[in-house]
Image (cartoon, helix red, strand yellow):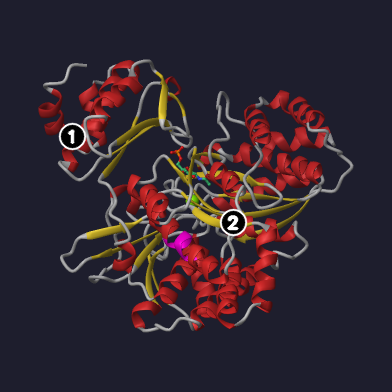
């Protein structure tokens, strides 16, 4: 380690005084102008991680669905997974070390993790389309270089594409070729093979409108579309030619506002989808004949995928263990449908892809999705081998199903949830099953639900257990939620501190009887208590609520809270 060079270069990427950042659910994220030192230091850390694992490590510069002015960075571990938790702590320490402590922190990490500093290191880098991303990824490269690491800069990539590259490079090419061309070819070949087998290939199944959130997804889908155009024609909106990244568009906007993105014309019953800013999330939606908007979120995507996989397994005659992984945000109807109708076991983990991914690895086939549209399916190596054999050996009908499964396995990005790959999986399944978007939507009816975010003085006053479904502190909060929830059918509510923003998130759902009012009361009640405990100084409960709901809550809160005692 050339400590002199590190100190010299670090001074060119100086840390702003007093700035403390945390490696959160999906890495570091904040205003782009505060991130130069973090990028340089994550370049250093990636080299150490690469030396320790003797593998290629990825660094992605993106802030996903955050506003354009923000940016962020996350490290990708050898099998395309999120960084191991112990290294998240190292990342936080390194990012927050004062200039004069940097060397010591680097040495500490190397010693704690028994890093052989003589080992070679290789880092691959990708970035999204934010104006700040190019310069920030150059700072990552500075960090890699000063520690003697080799690197390959892929330039503009979606986040899941970078995960794919890392996975390919560390599995000797068995997973695929670590080039953008390799990614396009692998997915498109599987998709075209699958759609060739579809009996219904009318126009309805062939065309799809895609809102690209004015982000990297547009660029990459445009590059890729001619590879799969035999099976699907995509019409891109919010492609970055004029609008602002994630502004009034994209998967996060559509999911949280439960309305279509701006900049997209939707005719009734047309199938549409939205990516987020780095194209690792996808949600579908349509307008019915009466002009009502219908959102098809991650829960329904998981249901479609897992039921299709289960049907194929039955046809092949394989009894493999298949599980679905969700978070507390999964709509209660989806969980009931999966467990009771489809008889598929469902598991709940904390929010954040790393938790779901980890749980999904326990099954022969693990399908995981967050309601917000982030997810994929994982297949164990044993399953992949078994299906490959079946596709060669079984007799006709079974062979056809095994072949289909083989292609579906290739079509999933098993390194990370991937909007492009998920979109192609969904389109293939709809075409193969001859399902319209309305039929898919009708699998079950979502319980009415609401989500809210609230700023509090210190979100850490709230701690949770049971996969974030129960609040442990502040005292009294969970009891208040319980008291209220038990009065309404199929109702559920929870409060959790966000891992990506300085806010508290609140979720509630109940059956459709008096849905809107009931759901708002659910939210108002625990929040009322919550804000009494930890409101920002000078902020009144109602004004905070009112601001969050855009005024919607004011009248309701007056009426519905007047008879409740807090
Ligand atoms: C990040 C997470 C996502 C989570 C979201 C909200 C990854 C790759 N992404 O986008 O899983 O749902 O943050 O998290 O992990 P929050 O509610 O804790 O802010
Ligand atoms: Mg994202």
What secondary structure do most residues of the magenta stretch adopt? helix
Please tell me which of labels 1 and 2 falls first in the chain: 2
- Secondary structure at badge 1 equals helix
Name the foreground residue: 111 vs 318: 318
Name the foreground residue: 23 vs 478: 478
Magenta region includes residue 158: no
Magenta region includes residue 307: yes
Expressed as whole percent of the image width and height from the top left, the position of residue 532 reads 29, 17
Q: Quadrant of residue 554?
A: top left
Residue at x 61% of width, y 55% of height: 364
| Depicted 175 relative to depicted 364: above or below | below
Q: Quadrant of residue 539?
A: top left
Instruction: Residue 551: tell me if it is visible.
Output: no
| Depicted 346 relative to depicted 542: above or below | below
Expressed as whole percent of the image width and height from the top left, the position of residue 523 reads 26, 32
Kindly give the residue lying farthest to the right in the view shown. Answer: 118
Name the foreground residue: 204 vs 543: 204
| Depicted 250 relative to depicted 76: above or below | below
Question: Which segment is the magenta one?
Answer: 304-308
Task: Determine the CA span between mark 1 and mark 2.
Answer: 42 Å
On residue 88, the disc is none
Quadrant occupied by the C terminus: top left
On residue 553, the disc is 1
Expressed as whole percent of the image width and height from the top left, the position of residue 116 reads 86, 38
Left of 289 or right of it: where is 531? right
Left of 250 or right of it: where is 350? right
- Secondary structure at badge 2 equals strand
Quadrant occupied by the N terminus: top right
How many residues crowd around disc 2 within 10 Å: few (fewer than 14), some, or many (20 or more)? many
Instruction: Residue 384: tell me if it is visible.
Output: yes
On residue 378, the disc is 2
């Amino acid at each position: 380690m050339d400590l002199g060079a590190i100190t010299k270069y670090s001074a060119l990427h100086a840390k702003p005084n007093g700035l403390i950042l945390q490696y959160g659910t999906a890495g570091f994220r904040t205003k782009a102008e505060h991130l130069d030192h973090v990028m340089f230091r994550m370049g250093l850390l990636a080299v150490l991680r690469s030396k320790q694992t003797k593998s290629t490590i990825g660094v992605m510069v993106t802030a996903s669905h955050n506003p354009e002015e923000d940016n962020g960075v996350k490290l990708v571990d050898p099998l395309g997974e999120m960084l191991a938790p112990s290294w998240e702590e190292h990342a936080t320490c390194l990012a927050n070390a004062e200039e004069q402590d940097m060397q010591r922190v680097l040495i500490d990490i190397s010693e704690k993790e028994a890093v052989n500093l003589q080992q070679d290191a290789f880092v691959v880098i990708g970035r999204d389309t934010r104006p700040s991303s190019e310069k920030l990824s150059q700072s990552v490269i500075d960090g890699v270089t000063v520690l003697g690491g080799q690197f390959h800069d892929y330039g503009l990539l979606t986040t899941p594409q970078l995960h794919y590259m890392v996975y390919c490079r560390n599995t000797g090419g068995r997973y695929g070729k670590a080039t953008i061309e390799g990614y396009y070819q692998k997915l498109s070949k599987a998709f075209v093979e699958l759609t060739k087998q579809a009996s219904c290939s009318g126009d309805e199944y062939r065309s799809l409108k895609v809102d690209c959130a004015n982000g990297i997804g547009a660029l990459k889908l445009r590059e890729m579309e001619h590879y799969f155009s035999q099976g699907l024609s995509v019409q891109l909106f919010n492609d970055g030619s004029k609008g602002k990244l994630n502004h009034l568009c994209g998967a996060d906007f559509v999911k949280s506002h439960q309305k279509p993105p701006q900049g997209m014309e939707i005719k009734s019953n047309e199938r549409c989808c939205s990516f987020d800013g780095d194209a690792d999330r996808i949600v579908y939606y349509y307008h019915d004949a009466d002009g009502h908007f219908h959102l098809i979120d991650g829960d329904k995507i998981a249901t479609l995928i897992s039921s299709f996989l289960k049907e194929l397994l039955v046809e092949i005659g394989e009894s493999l263990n298949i599980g679905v992984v969700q978070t507390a945000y999964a709509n209660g109807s989806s969980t009931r449908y999966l467990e009771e109708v489809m008889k598929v076991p469902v598991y709940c983990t904390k929010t954040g892809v790393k938790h779901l991914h980890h749980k999904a690895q326990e099954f022969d086939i693990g399908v995981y999705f967050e309601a917000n549209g982030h997810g994929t399916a994982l297949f164990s190596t044993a399953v992949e081998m078994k299906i490959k054999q079946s596709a060669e050996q079984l007799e006709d009908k079974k062979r056809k199903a095994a072949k289909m499964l083989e292609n579906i396995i290739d079509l999933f990005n098993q390194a990370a949830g991937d909007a492009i790959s998920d979109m192609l999986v969904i389109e293939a399944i709809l075409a193969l099953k001859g399902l319209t978007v309305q039929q898919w939507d009708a699998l079950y009816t979502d319980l009415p639900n609401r989500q809210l975010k609230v700023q509090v003085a210190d979100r850490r006053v709230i701690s949770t257990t049971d996969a974030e479904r129960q609040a442990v502190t502040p005292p009294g909060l969970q009891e208040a939620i319980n008291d209220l929830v038990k009065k309404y059918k199929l109702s559920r509510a929870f409060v959790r501190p966000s891992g990506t923003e300085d806010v508290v998130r609140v979720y509630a759902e109940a059956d459709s009887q008096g849905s809107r009012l009931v759901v708002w009361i659910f939210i108002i009640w625990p929040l009322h208590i919550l804000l009494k405990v930890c409101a920002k100084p000078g902020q009144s409960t109602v004004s905070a609520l009112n601001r969050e709901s855009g005024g919607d809550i004011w009248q309701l809160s007056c009426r519905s809270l007047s008879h409740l005692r807090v």
